[in-house]
Amino acid sequence: MKQLLLGGLLFLSAFSNAQYKEITHPANFRGVIYDLSTNLPIEGAMIKIENQTNEFITMSDVEGYFFLLGAPKGGFKVKISMTGYEDKILENVQRITDVEYHLGLEQKKVQHFDLN
């Protein structure tokens, strides 16, 4: 009888503690990648998010949109790269929910050489 009573008391204690724990949701890092000169979306851009312990990679879709669930806590670094464009690097980005980033990429300048 004592064991049953003790077991029930432990169960209720654990249940009441679980109700008071803070509920945290993973952060979403999302936005749109576009061409700075044309304002058109860039499909297939690589978005790499990293901190000291983790690295996450996603790609932009046909509308330039990207979405990453579970961005790292604290400050992190974002690197956006795409063939034909200059890389864009953002340092110490804080995990912010309910924000949509609009990130423009600049086309690489092509050098012309005269072979004459």
Image (tube, grey):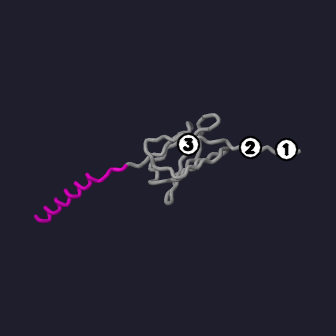
Dot 1 crowding, Cα within 10 Å, few <14, some 14–19, many 20+: few
- Which is nearer the eye, 23 or 76? 76
Q: Which residue is rendered at x = 26% and y = 52% of the image?
A: 20
The residue identified by callout 3 is 60
Residue 85, position as x, y percentages in the image: 65, 44
The reply to whether dot 2 and dot 1 touch (C-beta < 8 Å) is no
Q: CA distance from mark 2 to mark 1?
A: 13 Å
Quarter-wise, where is residue 108 in the image?
A: top right
Name which residue type carries label 1: Asp
- Residue at point 11% right, 65% down? 2
Q: Secondary structure at mark 3?
A: loop
Report which residue position mark 2 lands on: 110
Circle 2 SS class: loop
Residue of label 1: 114
Residue type (three-letter) at the residue carrying disc 3: Ser
Say which label, 3 or 1, has the lower sequence index.
3
Q: Is residue 98 left or right of residue 23?
A: right
Q: Please name the amino acid that badge 2 sits on.
A: Val
Left or right of 101? Residue 18 is left
Question: Residue 27's spot in the image, x, y percent?
Answer: 43, 48
Q: Residue furthest right?
A: 116
Region of the chain picked out in magenta, as a range: 1-24
x and y percentages locating residue 16 in the rendered image: 22, 54
Could you give the CA–CA distance between mark 3 and mark 1, rounded to whole angstroms? 37 Å
Question: How far from the left and from the top, in percent, is residue 72?
Answer: 46, 53
Residue at screen point 55% across, 48% down: 47
Q: Circle 3: is it few (<14), some (14-19), or many (20+) Cα within 10 Å?
A: many
Which comes before the other along the chain, label 3 or label 2?
3
Nearer the viewer's eye, disc 3 or disc 1?
1
